[in-house]
Amino acid sequence: MTTRPSDSTSALPGRPPIVDLATWQAARDELLVREKAHTREGDAIAAARRRLPMVEFDGTVKVIGPQGPVPFLELFQGRNELLVYKHMWHDGAPHQGQCEGCTTMAWNLKDALYLNARGVSFAIVTTGPWDEVAPFVEFMGYTHPWYSVRDVAEPIGGGMAAIACYLREGDRTFLTYSTGGRGNEPANGTFALLDMTPYGRGETWEDKPEGWPEGSHACWYWRTDADGNATWGPTSRPVPQWTRPGATPVETLGRHGDCH
């Protein structure tokens, strides 16, 4: 393998410095020490998460699914553990106007086979009315179960754009954990992979070396136009929607306020 040492003639603007393999390996090994510490701290946090107390709630509360009203207990599908993603909803908006952030989460959780193999069920709940939710789920091609929790209080309904974990003991149900914001990121491996690349997520908040591309506002690439250009304009859609049959540019997102 041919390598070149870093010098004024081989350095590329807006790029990492060019070094020989041994120098690169030394820098990589130094960073690995920090990465391992980060992993161990994550393990310790997970251990603390397993020791959190839990809150009992009424699992017979009805939610709306494809078969009509069903008790929340049914979401466990006979298993003792349940992981739920709470999908935001914009009432009355067409498919292209629904939450792009939640779309990234739901799309990256294409199915729950490995969760199920571990004895954990998975479902998505949203505050949208079922007559709007059902055609959206069909359009997106989602195979995981969806339910409307409209007018249902916490810990089943309430705040959306969150992950929640539940435990069942017979007919008794308990909330064990919930998180939102960047706490949702484990559901979307794209973020972790982008963090490994030289330019990261391409967002303005990231700490970058001088000369790196400035980037744009957070999550700017969640929507594109028909040509794949990142945009939050009225002709955009959440990225996965362009793979759906019949998806075309539109004139409005059909929802109130800014699209981001």
Image: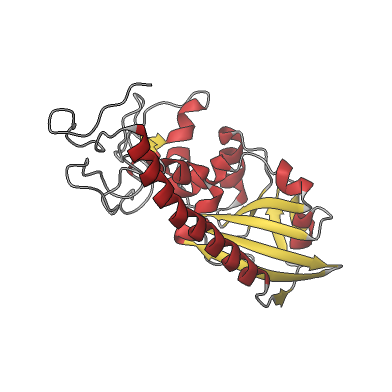
On the rendered structure, is 112 left or right of 196?
Answer: right
| Rendering coords of residue 174 (x, y %) | 73, 71
Quarter holding the N terminus is top left
Residue at point 35%, 35% (across, down): 236
On the rendered structure, is 20 left or right of 163?
Answer: left
| Rendering coords of residue 254 (x, y %) | 38, 44
Residue furthest toward the top? 1
Q: Which of the two residues, 49 or 71, is positioned nearer the viewer here?
A: 49
Residue at point 24%, 36% (across, down): 15
| Rendering coords of residue 216 (x, y %) | 26, 45
The answer to whether residue 195 is above or below residue 148 is: above
Residue furthest toward the front? 22
Q: Which of the two residues, 19 or 133, is positioned nearer the viewer here?
A: 19
The answer to whether residue 134 is above or below residue 59 is: above
Q: In this figure, which colouring scheme has been used for the structure?
A: secondary structure
Q: Is residue 25 visible?
A: yes
Quadrant position of residue 200: top left
